[in-house]
Image (tube, helix red, strand yellow):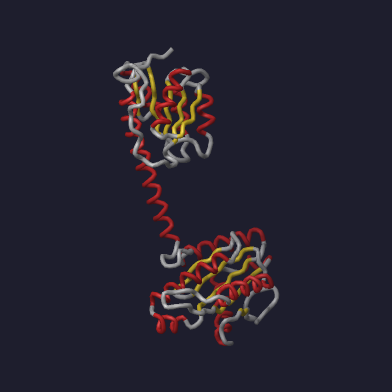
Amino acid sequence: MNEIAVGPTGELKQTQPVLDDKASSLNTVLIAEDDPIFRRILESWFKRWEYRVTAVENGVDAWKVLQREDAPKLVILDWMMPGMDGIELCRRIRRRDQGPYRYVLLLTAKDDKQDVVAGLEAGADDYLTKPFDVDELRARVRAGRRILDLEAALIRAQSALQFEAAHDRLTAIWNRGAILDLMRGEMERSRRSEDSLGIIMADVDFFKKVNDTYGHLVGDTVLQEVGHRLASAVRSYDSVGRYGGEEFLIVVPGCDALNLVVTAERLRHRIADQPIDTAGGPVTVTISLGLAAIQGTESKSSDCAELIHHADEALYVAKARGRNRVEITPASRVIGQHGS
């Protein structure tokens, strides 16, 4: 049986305050230890410190746990275990190049310098030589948590930067560059599959009048709500982006001209049928929509610029014919024509 010291008095006492970190996905720990008494003691400590604990008795079971999507990020491994020892498990963890970082604390009765070096080179972040004190374990665990917290903060910052790079700051939908990239991707897919592709150019009617009447803050609220309503009224695999100013681009894959018109009419009603609540009071807003669609082999001879050009022409017609309407011009490369 492994030797262990449980604090200066030699007994397990509930004298340690809990970690002051609030519960989160980082407050999980995997304990792999073949000694059942030592494993229960470790589990008791970590639960007292408000960790969610998964405890296993060998390296094989630990490796199975680490394959799960919700695997703990903090890993406590005994060096000597049946099936797969802690050193081999460290190597396997570090060979994985995807997923979040796992902080590994290796527990060992070996105190020779070469053994310590071997453990660290295998991928352990830290080690404790048995017997050890509970306060030392807690201090080393907190050091590991600081590293995991830092990684989590970096991931959040990176995600925020990625979101900002692809999304419009005002409306939080795709920005111009991102929606055009998505459109190009759908065009390539359409060419390969010879499937249909539709786009919708939507423009807020008389938006300058909204700004002049209510002010730019209300105008911003209107654009935010229009973007939200458009995004909430399309399918999960459709894409809505702010093309510029008060103009929006909607990419609708797998949609021919007839169904594209149905979609556009739904969007038109989604905006026009209910006033937008703003700091200046309810504001009634409408949009004009220009459509363009390609289908089948047409996708091989079309490009994004051409499709946008046809949708722009249709939008111009919708504006000229009184606004708050859906149009597809005869010049559009579509299967079927429609005007409303």
The vertical placement of 89 against 260, above or below, is above
Quick one: quadrant of the N terminus?
Answer: top left
The residue sitting at 48% across, 18% down in the picture is: 36
On the image, the x and y values in percent for residue 17 come to: 33, 32
Residue placed furthest toward the top: 1
Q: Give the side of residue 69 with respect to residue 78, left or right.
A: right
The residue sitting at 38% across, 23% down in the picture is: 119
Quadrant position of residue 304 = bottom right
Quadrant position of residue 38 = top left
Q: Give the side of residue 144 with respect to residue 293, left or right.
A: left
On the image, the x and y values in percent for residue 285 come to: 51, 79
Residue nearer the viewer, 207 or 251: 207
The vertical placement of 142 against 317, above or below, is above
Q: Mark yes or no: residue 306 visible.
A: no
Residue placed furthest toward the left: 8
The residue sitting at 55% across, 68% down in the picture is: 250
Quick one: quadrant of the C terminus?
Answer: bottom right
On the image, the x and y values in percent for residue 94 come to: 44, 32
